[in-house]
Image: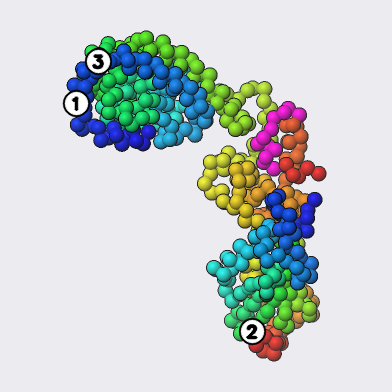
Amino acid sequence: MMTPGGSGRFRPLPTAMYAGYSGTASSWVAKTSVSASGKRIQREMAELNVDPPADCSAGPKGDNLYHWIATIIGPSGTPYEGGIFFLDIIFPSDYPFKPPKLVFKTRIYHCNVDTAGNLSVDILRDSWSPALTITKVLQAIRSIFLKPEPYNPALPMIARLYLSDREKHDEVAKEWTLRFAK
Amino acid sequence: MISDSITNASATAAPSAKDFGKKKRTNRSAKLKQSKLGLRREQWLSQVAMANKGDKEEIDSNRKPRSENPDQRDRPVENLDGLSREAEDNSGTHHHESFIESLSNSPNSILSGMNSIPNFSSSSSSGSGGSCSGNITEEEDPDDDGCLDDWEAIADALAADDDKHEKENPPESCEEHASIKQSASPRASVSGSNVAIRDVKPAMSRKQKSNQAWRPDDKLRPQGLPNLEKQRSFPVMNLHYSSVAVPSSCPICYEDLDLTDSNFLPCPCGFRLCLFCHKTICDGDGRCPGCRKPYERNTIKVEASVQGCGLTIRLARSSSMFCRS
């Protein structure tokens, strides 16, 4: 029933339904995507430009609406202060109904980010809601900079250190920020 | 209606005196006017069938032609059965106000008002055409003249009448009857029959209105209809029908919400979305994007039982349309 264009309204559009090809991002994508996910992503982009969240920015990488790049500046008062962290955002073709995939491209010492850059954030997995937007997701990620979630870790070792020896953890994190994110 | 009030307002000061002179002159053409009136009455009756379709609660006195007014206030007088009177109390007073307002606006509408108690056509003519407002006095019958010469007195009486109308309804019925008899008596019979027709209409119009199901609090609701759980699980439903707070576009796909979508409230948390997105979500994990709770499935039962009775739209629309599984 659902086409790869996904989630779309029934429109008299032979090709546009398939415009939002997902998969491994950089395949073909129509220049003017009118599918439901395309419209939604375009609107989010506009909203992000109008009212960007603090310390965050995001936008399409190239002309592919479904592949974004985002930056988050490490908030002050944290060991990530001053670092600029890049993330890849990949929107699935049935985007608002499935969460976007966010991957840290900058290495970071954080208990909720594994070595490959994948995040263990519940709203990007089970707690995803179509009502969430990329703005809110970025805000959520920024909030785990401020307050890591050691009980839902991607790297339990870091979480353990965070819980047992906070100072040591912060020191290492600061070092990593200096080395990789500046 | 608007043009009517404007012209009336402009006509308040000067023409009132002039009109009397004009009226005398035009008495001779009363016969001609009489036949015109007959025509208009026919026209009006056919229009009313259309205009009266809307639910009374939704009547907006600004939009409706004033021709509604005499009828609205007439009905509780003519039939004192009290049941239909209660239903239209609100709209009734509403119309009274606008009616009084129009009275104070202009002598013309007073005359038309007087005349239109038994005769619907004159008020509708003043409502429909601004051109008529200037010479409404011409439409009076010769035998009306006796009472219409001192229209100010009548206006006062009428205004007082309306005040009473709002406070205590029954007693003024005799006065109304008197005034009906005062003015053209042959038309009274016509108005009587009109009223009789009208009494049937609220029931009719309610049915005709967009095939909407009966509300549980509806007085005219047939006893045989079953009471459904539905109404309890969506207590805000009725409010939202007229609510302004409905978002104009779906928060999920940003498509505009059409009429069905904006009446669609799938979750008690109040999160709205379009039917397409709702279907997609129900195909997936079926949780409300607003509160992340699963959509209630018990609505399916309601729909099934209702389908048995052949009752429909609102329930089918409200939730379970796509949740069938």
Q: Amino acid at mark 1?
A: Lys
- Nearer the camera: disc 1 or disc 2: 1
Give the camera-side residue of B298 and A65: A65
Residue at left offset 44%, top offset 18%: B42
Residue type at the position of mark 3: Asn
Instruction: Using the image, name the chain to which the residue with label 2 belongs.
Output: A
> Does A132 sit above or below residue B93?
below
Please tell me whether residue A138 is drawn above or below residue A166 in the rendered image. above
Is B190 part of what is drawn in magenta?
no
Chain of the residue that carries numbered disc 1 in the rendered image: B
Secondary structure mostly seen in magenta is: helix
Q: Chain of mark 3?
A: B
In front of the other: B252 or A62: A62
Q: Residue at x 41, y 10 (%)?
A: B189
Callouts 2 and 3 on one subunit? no
Q: Is residue B318 magenta?
A: yes
Q: CA distance from mark 2 to mark 3?
A: 95 Å
At x 57%, y 30%, the residue is B209
In this view, the residue in front, A13 or B104, is A13
Residue A169 pos. (x, y %) = 71, 84
Residue that label 1 marks: B18
Residue B27: which disc?
3
Q: Name the image quarter holding the C terminus of chain B.
A: top right
Which residue was labeled with disc 2?
A: A83
Q: Position of residue A123 (x, y in %)?
A: 71, 65
